[in-house]
Image: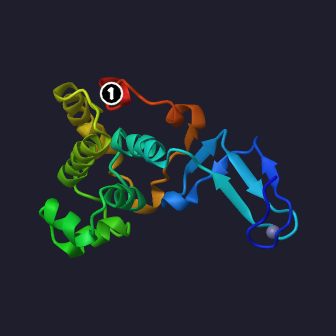
Amino acid sequence: MEFCWGCGGKLEIIKDRPYHYRECGLDNVYLHGIIQYRCPECGEEAPEIPELKELHLLIAKELVCKGELMEGAEIRFLRKELRLKSKEMAELLSITPETYSRWENSREIISEGSDSQLRYLYILNAEDKAGRVLHEGIRFARSLASKKSTRKIRNGRKIEDRKPVKIDISISEWVMPHTEPIFTEECY
Ligand SMILES: [Zn+2]
């Protein structure tokens, strides 16, 4: 039996409700199959999320493999995963901090070149951190590049019309260690 860290009441265990994972900084991520605790006394709630690193890798995969230019919150998510400050990110993308800040704050749409570069940067670093092969090399790069035209067309829409699709991830997808590369040609 677990007790509430706030009021000491007995906690309820909830297993059948998707968890809206706002803490990751994106507003469209839902986790399935995890345990959540809720205090009926004071309403305090907390999820139990194992293997955060693997989960974040899967969330990042959704963004890296997206067939559309990334939005502000997504750009920020990848930067944070890279553990970089905005200024450092701007430097790596060879743009001014002001431009970068407009992209991250959704005041301007990211350039195509920087969008691709950011995806590659993420994959490189993720692989280095994970210590295992995560991508199919040039095959993946080709499929990423081939989506460029699609990204451009969709980019014709206004910033406020761009609504990210819901990302549903089930616990079984991230708690099992992946031995196969996750950034593959079939990624899209
Ligand atoms: Zn409580």
Q: In the shown orientation, is residue 106 left or right of residue 34?
A: left
Q: Residue 75, percent across and down?
A: 34, 58
**Which one is in front, 160 or 46?**
46
Query: Residue 170, located in which quarter of the rendered image?
Result: top right
Check disc 1 and give the amino acid type: Pro
Q: Which residue is mark 1?
A: 181
Residue 41, how many percent across, how many down? 88, 68
Query: Residue 186 appears in which quarter of the rendering?
Result: top left
Residue positioned most to the front: 1
Residue at image location 29% in from the left, 72% down from the top: 101
Secondary element type, mark 1: loop
Instruction: Give the image location of residue 109, x and y in percent.
Output: 31, 60
Q: Quadrant of the C terminus?
A: top left
- The image shows residue 54, relative to residue 10, as above or below, that is above
Q: Quadrant of ligand 1?
A: bottom right
- The residue located at (24%, 26%) in the rendering is 136
Q: Residue at x 78, y 56 (%)?
A: 2
Identified at 86% across, 60% down, the residue is 10
Instruction: Rate crowding at label 1 as few (under 14), some (14 to 19) or many (20 or more) other CA atoms within 10 Å.
Output: few
Q: Residue furthest left?
A: 94
Residue 45 image position (x, y, % from top left)? 73, 61
Q: Nearer the viewer, residue 42 or 58?
A: 42
94 in relation to 148, above or below: below
Is residue 106 left or right of 170 when viewed as pictured? left
